[in-house]
């Protein structure tokens, strides 16, 4: 009520009144059947929205501070045209087109033009939102489409108060909106709020909100893989969801933006810049022939050729260089040669200027003459002059191939950075890569002559990352036909990084007690995501499951695995691994290190028949997993039923599951003294018994991490890792070797025995191989029948 008690008020209603006491001064009352309702969304909507954006993709973000803008006085005509289209273009049409596609080959200045245009629109209060995709960004969100709508919505909320209120209400009403697909997010967070605002405005008035949404680098958006984490469905685990392609995600963005812009209530223009790749050409020039109805194409290489701007840039920059080098001269025809060589690619001219800016052993005049004298063989490749320039700069290095491995390694390590963390600092990359074979030379020697291609921070800078001036350098290095003999293939690059990683771990294992790598480097190391969905430990096992793409690599040394596992656990905070949820990786890394020789031991000699044909024993699993449980004394072993024709990797994955199932079965059998080498055996108290190769004893390990969550890889099993790498399975391997040797001897005279651990159907013979005297002395398990007749 108001002061007059009429029950009306001109004041707007408040959203929440948390401090109001509805029962203040009340007495002698009771409440029956009280129901209290609380909002399903109890967080600040804008703060929640903020957690889902790609902050680095916004045009004026810290991440983009070094990305190109137009040189002063250049690209004026194209910027004026685009700004005019944003502010008043096609106003004479009843349904003006709201989308424009800006395209052109790499190096034509698309990002520079749109970056400068965004600044101009912001100054003129015409900028609604921006999203600059990037293939070498600080966060993974800038490479994928998952944060696109949230980032746009967040900027709309900040720029337009009326829109902000509607978006907040949409989030409160749909607290799970950020788990929805892209079309649903756009409809809920952008289109519906704008439609609600438009509905409240007179139709004869212009929209309350106007402006432009700028999307740049859409061709650099990569595919986001969504994994099924349902561990209860065995069939679904065997059939992983098909992988999406980047073209599918790019097309999804285009469809979402087109759908939004087709709404009459949508007041913004949408400017999309990307290379003229097939998916975009097909979308904007589809067979239905309706491209003119929703978008207009602008080819920077054809309609706004940059030759005049490149000429102006070269003239002014060469004059600047001459101020420092008075003897530096050039002829007017030299400028024309460079302009023609550029073929409209600003990056060619910019690279030449940076190259001339760097101090060389030769005079700058000689360097310029060399560039002018570069000969090409074809006019069909628009990048030929740029390629020749890159090739010349790189080949000047006395260790060009090694330096290129470093350049590729810098890019690869940035792509391995997991989650939304920043690109690794140059200091961390240097410390990581310097352990590679042949990389003992200084970083300054390897990269110091490439200042025209890469921004190189000080060697002790633990914050600033390396930065490439233009993505075209990586395009060049990734293309064998373009970079020719300097090409580093995927196998060579993987081996380079693998060797570096192992050297880091080995060096860590030999450090004196009380010393270690800097904490910031350890954070970087354990945040690496080498294989998708794995933490840094994934590199330890990727040579098994993914093959690390290099057939000459060997399994990781035990000391390296030991250091990685123990360091990971030492860095835990409140029982959790600091900066990494890598427990499963530790388990895999430790056990698969020893499973490979086991598989090699059995390869080609495994029983190739269904489990239904196996003799039923007291220890069999009854078909839950394809293996047979056997006993040697108090030790539990397995008969693995792997198909001979399957690849080793498939067999290895199956073996790993069977080991975990054996641990569960061990508890069910009720043998108090039974131990599985290196596996959890007490599922009720989570006690871990491991074999210690130093003391040659099994010991319970009290200081241990146990992950009790379900995991689709383990089918609900418990995964564990102990603190000091006593989980190495040397006893397991030696025991199996002894069993195989014994079985081989026994089966040599038994023609009806197929395989080393199985008995022919209906046989009541007891196969009881004995350990060698050496193993029997070291592992005094006693004697028990291996198999008991059913």
Image (cartoon, grey):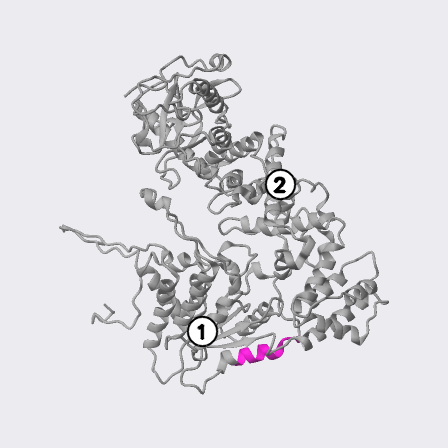
Labelled disc at residue 286: 1
Residue 574 visible in the shown view: no
Relative depth, front residue between 176 and 769: 769
Q: Main secondary structure of the magenta part?
A: helix
Residue at image x 21%, y 54%? Answer: 23
x, y percentage for residue 102? 54, 73
x, y percentage for residue 550? 58, 43
Assign the N terminus to one quadrant of the image: bottom left
Relative depth, front residue between 230 and 168: 230
Magenta-tinted stretch: 73-84
Relative depth, front residue between 575 and 732: 732
Residue at image x 41%, y 74%? Answer: 261
Give the residue furthest to the right.
327
Q: Residues within 10 Å of mark 1 (few under 14, many from 20)?
A: few
> Is residue 83 a member of the stretch shown in magenta?
yes
Earlier in the chain: of badge 1 and badge 2, it is 1
Q: Residues within 10 Å of mark 2 (few under 14, many from 20)?
A: many
Residue at image x 53%, y 67%? Answer: 277
Kind of element beneath mark 2: helix
> Image check: 680 left or right of 11?
right
> Is residue 597 a member of the stretch shown in magenta?
no
Assign the C terminus to one quadrant of the image: top left
x, y percentage for residue 363? 84, 61
Give the residue furthest to the bottom.
92
* Residue on which the image places disc 2: 500
x, y percentage for residue 299? 57, 75
Relative depth, front residue between 203 and 271: 271
Say above or below: 405 vs 640. below
The Cα atoms of the two marked residues, 1 and 2, are separated by 48 Å
């Amino acid at each position: 009520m108001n002061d007059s008690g009429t029950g009306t008020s001109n004041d707007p209603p408040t959203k929440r009144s948390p401090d109001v006491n509805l029962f203040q001064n009340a007495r002698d009352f009771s409440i029956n059947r009280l129901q209290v309702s609380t909002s399903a969304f109890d967080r600040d909507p804008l703060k929640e929205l903020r957690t889902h954006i790609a902050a680095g993709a916004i045009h004026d973000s810290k991440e983009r501070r070094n990305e190109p803008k137009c040189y002063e006085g250049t690209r004026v005509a194209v910027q004026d045209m685009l700004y005019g289209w944003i502010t008043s273009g096609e106003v004479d049409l009843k349904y003006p087109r709201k989308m424009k596609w800006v395209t052109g080959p790499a190096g034509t200045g698309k990002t520079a033009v749109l970056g400068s245009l965004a600044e101009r629109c912001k100054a003129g209060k015409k900028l609604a939102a921006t999203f600059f995709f990037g293939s070498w960004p600080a966060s993974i969100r800038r490479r994928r489409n998952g944060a696109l709508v949230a980032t746009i919505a967040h900027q709309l909320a900040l720029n337009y108060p009326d829109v902000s209120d509607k978006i907040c209400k949409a989030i409160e009403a749909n607290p799970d909106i950020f788990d929805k697909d892209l079309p649903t997010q756009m409809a809920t967070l952008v289109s519906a709020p704008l439609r609600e605002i438009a509905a409240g405005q007179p139709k004869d008035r212009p929209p309350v909100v106007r402006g432009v949404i700028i999307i740049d680098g859409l061709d650099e958006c990569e595919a986001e893989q969504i994994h099924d984490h349902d561990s209860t469905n065995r069939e679904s685990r065997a059939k992983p969801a098909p992988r999406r392609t980047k073209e599918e995600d790019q097309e999804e963005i285009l469809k979402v933006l087109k759908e939004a812009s087709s709404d009459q209530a949508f007041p913004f223009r949408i400017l999309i810049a990307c290379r003229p790749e097939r998916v975009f050409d097909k979308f904007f020039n589809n067979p239905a022939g309706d491209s003119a109805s929703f978008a207009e194409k602008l080819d920077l290489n054809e309609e706004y050729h940059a030759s005049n701007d490149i000429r102006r840039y070269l003239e002014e920059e060469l004059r600047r260089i001459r101020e420092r080098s008075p003897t530096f001269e050039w002829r007017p025809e030299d400028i024309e040669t460079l302009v023609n060589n550029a073929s409209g690619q600003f990056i060619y001219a910019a690279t030449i200027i940076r190259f001339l800016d760097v101090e060389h052993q030769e005079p700058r005049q000689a360097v310029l003459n060399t560039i002018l004298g570069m000969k090409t063989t074809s006019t069909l490749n628009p990048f030929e002059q740029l390629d020749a320039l890159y090739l010349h700069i790189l080949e000047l290095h006395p260790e060009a191939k090694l330096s290129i491995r470093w350049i590729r390694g810098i890019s690869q390590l940035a792509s391995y950075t997991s989650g939304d963390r920043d690109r690794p600092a140059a200091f961390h990359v240097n410390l990581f890569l310097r352990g590679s074979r042949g990389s003992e030379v200084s970083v300054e020697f390897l990269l110091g002559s490439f200042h025209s291609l890469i921004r190189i921070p000080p060697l002790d800078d633990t914050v600033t990352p390396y930065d490439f001036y233009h993505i075209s350098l990586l395009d060049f290095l990734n293309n064998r036909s373009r970079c020719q003999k300097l090409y580093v293939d995927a196998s060579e690059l993987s081996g380079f990084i693998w060797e570096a990683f192992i050297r880091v771990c080995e060096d860590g294992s030999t450090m004196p007690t009380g010393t270690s790598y800097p904490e910031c480097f350890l954070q970087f190391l354990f945040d690496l995501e080498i294989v998708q969905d794995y933490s840094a430990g994934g590199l330890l096992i990727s040579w098994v499951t993914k093959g690390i793409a290099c057939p000459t690599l060997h399994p990781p040394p035990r000391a390296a695995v030991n250091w990685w596992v123990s360091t990971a656990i030492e860095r835990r905070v409140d029982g959790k691994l600091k900066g990494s949820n890598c427990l499963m990786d530790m388990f895999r890394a430790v056990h698969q290190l020893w499973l490979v020789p086991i598989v090699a031991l059995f390869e080609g000699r495994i029983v190739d028949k269904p489990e239904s044909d196996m003799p039923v024993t007291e220890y069999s699993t009854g078909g839950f997993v394809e293996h047979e449980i056997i006993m040697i004394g108090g030790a539990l072993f397995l008969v693995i039923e792997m198909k001979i024709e399957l690849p080793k990797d498939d067999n290895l994955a199956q073996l790993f599951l069977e080991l975990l199932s054996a641990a569960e079965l061990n508890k069910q059998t009720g043998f108090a003294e039974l131990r599985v080498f290196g596996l959890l055996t007490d599922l009720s108290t989570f006690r871990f018994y491991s074999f210690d190769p130093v003391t040659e004893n099994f010991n319970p390990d009290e200081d241990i991490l146990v992950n009790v969550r379900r995991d689709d890889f383990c089918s609900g099993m418990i995964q564990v890792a102990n603190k000091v790498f006593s989980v190495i399975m040397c006893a397991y391997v030696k025991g199996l070797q002894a069993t195989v040797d014994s079985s081989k001897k026994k089966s040599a005279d038994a023609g009806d025995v197929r395989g080393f651990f199985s008995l022919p159907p209906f046989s009541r013979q007891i196969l009881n191989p004995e350990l060698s005297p050496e193993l029997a002395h070291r592992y005094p398990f006693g004697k028990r029948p291996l198999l008991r007749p059913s």
